Image (cartoon, rainbow, N blue to C red):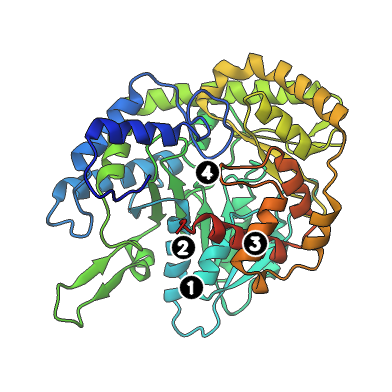
Amino acid sequence: MTALPAHGVPAEQVLAELGALRGRDLPTHGGRLFAYVYDAAVPGLDELAAAAYALAAHVNGLDPTAFPSLLAMENDLVAAAAQVTCGVDAAAGVVGNVTSGGTESLLLAVKAARDAHPEIAGPRLVVPASAHAAFAKAAQYLRVALDVVPVEPDTLRPDPAAMAAAITADTVLVACSAPCYPYGVVDPVAEIAARAADAGVRCHVDACFGGWLLPYLRRLGRPIPPFGFELPGVTSVSVDLHKYAYAPKGVSVLLHRDAALRRPQYFGYAGWPGYPMLNATVASTRSGGPVAGAWATLRHLGDDGYLRLAERTATAVTGLAAAVSTVDGLELLAEPATSVVVFTCTDPDPYVLADQLAARGWHTQPQLPYPPLPASIHLSVTAAVADQVDAFGPALRDGVAAARAAGPIQVPPELAAAVADLDPATLGPDAMAGLAAAAGFGPDGLPESMAVVNTLLATLPPDRRAGLLVEFLSLLQTPPH
């Protein structure tokens, strides 16, 4: 099959072919995929978002004066995000922009902080070890040095004093999470923001993962601390609408306390013969489809709808955590106070357990060890999971029994030897293809056991692990000739 056939293909056949391709994907609905997708399980919501998306798919966000509908919807989304995450009073004067996702929001927050200090030749960014990897990506893209502060093993949070100690004269931004993705815990934002303010440094709160959900959990009685502009030291906040606002991918919002703080985020250039180029985000041309889909989703669900969805999510979290707690050998790594259930295994092997759960239709996210923290299994919980909680407990017990019977994974000696002295920098595509085949990857997809791959990756230091995965991604994204 080719994307460009010699002669056009009928629309019905094209859609059938697309459906066949999608049939190989993990399920995006049904509450059994605990990563990557966010399912509200609200009848008709997908259809509404798709229709709204189609209405604005060809609208171009490059010029808001040409398409005022898109400008109006983006401003509505920014206002809604500010109100939800920070409250009506704290949202006064807040400005922001819609981006393509959390990574772009974080990148722009780092850019704004960096460009606010052109006099600093070697800008630096302070983050906890649990901060999203997108901060490292932003640092690499923007040539900002990254200072990583360890998290405390008992709390999984950074020590505010350690964060403050990492600030130097070249620090342009301090960041923290509400909550962090790996463990679902909220960093001590108030203390970190106050220390940053004392040092005269901006503080960004990455609330991409839970910023839309946490305020609703607070209204339901959960002990969620403040994390937004109600804290004086917080200068910017990011929140993804395609997560717990259940909007289509990809829509995020980057908020700044005021317009002066946002100003360095913008790009403007008029030194060429064409139109003056003005951008608030990384992309110039942007489809209005995701924005319209998000706007329609928020309008349809409303504040009361999100409160109900938050309650279903909280109920699901409680049920999943209880199921984990009743199985010997499994231990919750963090008290599940937000939307994450994360647990570690003394017995069985966590990677083998993840395979066994996948074989039973439950798709989890194994997390590699980050010493002194152990390997773990991460569950991002959405409202759709509430209907699956009763079925998860028996599947988990069956999976644990099967994983124990299978025993710890044994990496084939030849594969372990091939990786032991590997230098990803000199690894060519042919060698990478051979390595992938030895690990069980074939032309039709993943190996039978991802436990082998995860076990192998866990033996490598992070830089070599990342280098190997980059080469693997390059292999996947090389079309056949």
Residue 380, x across and y down, in percent: 59, 35
**In the depicted view, which residue is nearer to us: 458 or 289?**
458
Residue 219, x across and y down, in percent: 51, 28
Q: Quadrant of the N terminus?
A: top left
Q: Which of marks 4 and 3 is nearer the N terminus?
A: 4
Q: Real-space Cα distance between discs 4 and 1?
A: 23 Å
Amino acid type for the residue under numbered disc 4 = Phe
Residue assigned mark 1 = 142
Residue assigned mark 4 = 209
Q: In this view, does 100 lie to the left or right of 436?
A: left
The local secondary structure at tag 4 comes to loop
Amino acid type for the residue under numbered disc 2 = Leu
Q: Real-space Cα distance between discs 2 and 1?
A: 8 Å
Kindly check if marks 1 and 3 are in contact, taking CB atoms under 8 A apart as contact.
no
Question: Which residue shows up at 23% across the image and 55% down it?
Answer: 61
The local secondary structure at tag 1 comes to helix
Question: Which residue shows up at 42% across the image and 68% down it?
Answer: 112
Up/down of 7 relative to 300, above or below: below
The local secondary structure at tag 3 comes to helix
Question: Which residue shows up at 59% across the image and 80% down it?
Answer: 169
Q: Real-space Cα distance between discs 1 and 3?
A: 29 Å
